[in-house]
Image (spheres, rainbow, N blue to C red):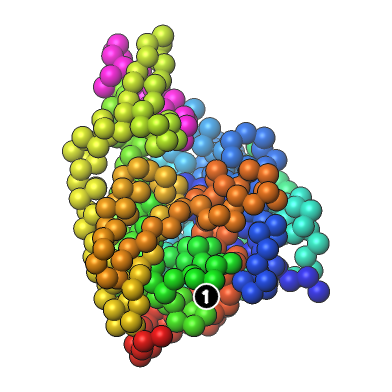
């Protein structure tokens, strides 16, 4: 029997997934780490990244890149795609949020609740995962796959309740996927009439999807530590995604990675804020934009190119764009001078300093001399994130050691140079697939409460 573990990371902007043999933690082999090409069949963009988007069109519901493209085309009509699923799933009253009608800008037909649209997206995601597994020559041979999903440790008090709800949502999505099948991956989406007929049936017959939960910070600890003789006892993780920036600290006790909940901070400013600052700076410098429509058109162009723009800014410190024959130069210094960026960086610096104090305090109690710092997520390469980690390196004890966002094993020849450039965005899914069961916050209906409480007696080891 060939048993594998598969972890799904449904991020604010993109969803990712990766698989690894069930015994990968003890028998680590980089060649068997399989990031899945969720959008590989679409032929454009990064094949590992699946756009987290749903768009309700006239008679159809579109998903992924098709949803983004259609929303862009109708932006002037105040139509938008539903995105930021992770943000919705973090609200304090999840049941109420799921049972709320979708806004008119998202669903002009007034037929969908937010739960319906999330279930539809998860069905699309599960179909993408299934097709990616079938297309992967290694994973396709698996006889059994255990599923997990990665999520921030949003709230310690009701993690169990949230996990139950998310397993139910995935179960409803899997039931709908069984009825809709490959139609979900069509660029034309699925007809609303088909959804109206099939979705109630799927929800009525659905059973909870049996899957584990791993906290994102724990997944980061897993991919950073796997295969190393000295994996470090304490770690602080900065995860800047599109919608949130999360700070978390962990302590390793035997084979477990235990979160230090006092260190946890979530900032509601992240990559999307940087995108808006960049776009506004470019529009200010473009000139000749006489109407609101001209500004909106340029904004939409910039958002489609934002990933490339940020890569240039982060790597070289500057980027040059052309608009209507005019060159527009932008530098990281321009971004860093922005008032909104300064406010964000101040909050980020304070949150990181707080998390580091907690991690260092626990390390001292356990007689350890080192805290490892790691940045993950789409913003890991941002120079201000790397500078934040490095400026906290001091000679005081416990010292701070910065780990690279991309581990050495991601450069292994088996990946032919394809994994390392995109690793920070795939890191959580990969770490979630590699982590042993002892690092999970929940398995099936098992409460994660024990995984978030620090009740282990501090001892020198």
Residue 397 in the image: state x and y as whole percent.
Answer: 27, 70
Residue at the location (35% across, 68% down)?
A: 371
Q: Visible in this render: residue 402?
A: yes
Residue at the location (63% across, 43% down)?
A: 417
- What residue did someone put label 1 on? 440
Residue 274 in the image: state x and y as whole percent.
Answer: 33, 39
Is residue 457 covered in magenta?
no
Judge the density around disc 1: few (<14), some (14-19), many (≥20) Cα neighbours within 10 Å: many
Residue 263 in the image: state x and y as whole percent.
Answer: 29, 69
Residue at the location (62% across, 34% down)?
A: 44
Q: Is residue 246 left or right of residue 160?
A: left
Is residue 286 covered in magenta?
yes
Where, by quadrant of the figure, is residue 262 drawn?
Answer: bottom left
For the stretch drawn in magenta, what is the main secondary structure? helix
Magenta part of the chain: 284-308
Q: Visible in this render: residue 93?
A: no
């Amino acid at each position: 029997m060939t048993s594998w573990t598969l972890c799904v990371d449904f991020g604010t902007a993109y969803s990712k997934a990766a698989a690894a043999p069930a015994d990968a933690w003890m028998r680590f082999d980089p060649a068997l780490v399989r990031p899945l090409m969720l959008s590989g069949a679409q032929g454009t963009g990064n094949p590992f990244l699946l756009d987290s988007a749903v768009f309700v069109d006239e008679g159809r519901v579109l998903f992924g890149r098709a949803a983004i493209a259609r929303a862009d085309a109708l932006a002037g009509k105040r139509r938008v795609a539903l995105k930021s699923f992770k943000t919705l799933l973090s609200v304090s009253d999840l049941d109420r949020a799921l049972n709320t009608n979708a806004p008119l800008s998202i669903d002009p037909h007034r037929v969908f609740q937010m739960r319906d649209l999330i279930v539809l997206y998860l069905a699309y995601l599960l179909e993408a995962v299934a097709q990616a597994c079938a297309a992967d020559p290694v994973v396709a041979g698996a006889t059994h796959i255990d599923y997990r999903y990665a999520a921030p440790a949003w709230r310690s008090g009701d993690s169990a309740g949230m996990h139950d709800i998310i397993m139910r949502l995935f179960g409803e999505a899997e039931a709908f996927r069984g009825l809709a099948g490959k139609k979900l991956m069509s660029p034309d989406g699925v007809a609303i009439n088909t959804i109206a007929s099939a979705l109630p049936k799927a929800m009525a017959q659905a059973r909870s999807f049996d899957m584990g939960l791993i906290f994102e910070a724990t997944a980061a600890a897993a991919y950073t530590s796997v295969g190393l003789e000295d994996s470090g006892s304490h770690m602080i993780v900065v995860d800047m995604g599109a919608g949130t920036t999360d700070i978390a600290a962990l302590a390793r006790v035997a084979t477990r990675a235990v979160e230090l909940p006092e260190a946890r901070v979530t900032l509601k400013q992240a990559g999307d804020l940087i995108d808006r600052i960049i776009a506004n700076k470019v529009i200010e410098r473009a000139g000749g934009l006489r109407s609101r429509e001209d500004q909106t058109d340029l904004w939409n162009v910039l958002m489609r190119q934002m990933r490339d723009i940020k890569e240039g800014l982060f790597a070289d410190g500057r980027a040059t764009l052309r608009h209507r024959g005019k060159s527009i130069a932008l530098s990281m210094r321009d971004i860093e001078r922005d008032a909104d960026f300064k406010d964000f960086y101040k909050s980020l610096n304070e949150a990181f300093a707080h998390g580091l104090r907690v991690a260092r305090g626990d390390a001292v109690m356990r007689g350890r001399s080192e805290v490892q710092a790691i940045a993950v997520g789409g913003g890991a390469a941002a120079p201000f994130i790397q500078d934040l980690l490095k400026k906290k390196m001091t000679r005081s004890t416990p010292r701070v050691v910065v780990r690279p966002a991309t581990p050495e094993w991601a450069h292994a020849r088996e990946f032919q140079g394809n994994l390392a450039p995109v690793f920070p965005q795939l890191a959580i899914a990969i770490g979630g697939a590699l982590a042993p069961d002892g690092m999970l916050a929940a398995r099936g209906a098992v409460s994660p409460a024990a995984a978030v409480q620090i009740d282990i007696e501090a001892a020198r080891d």
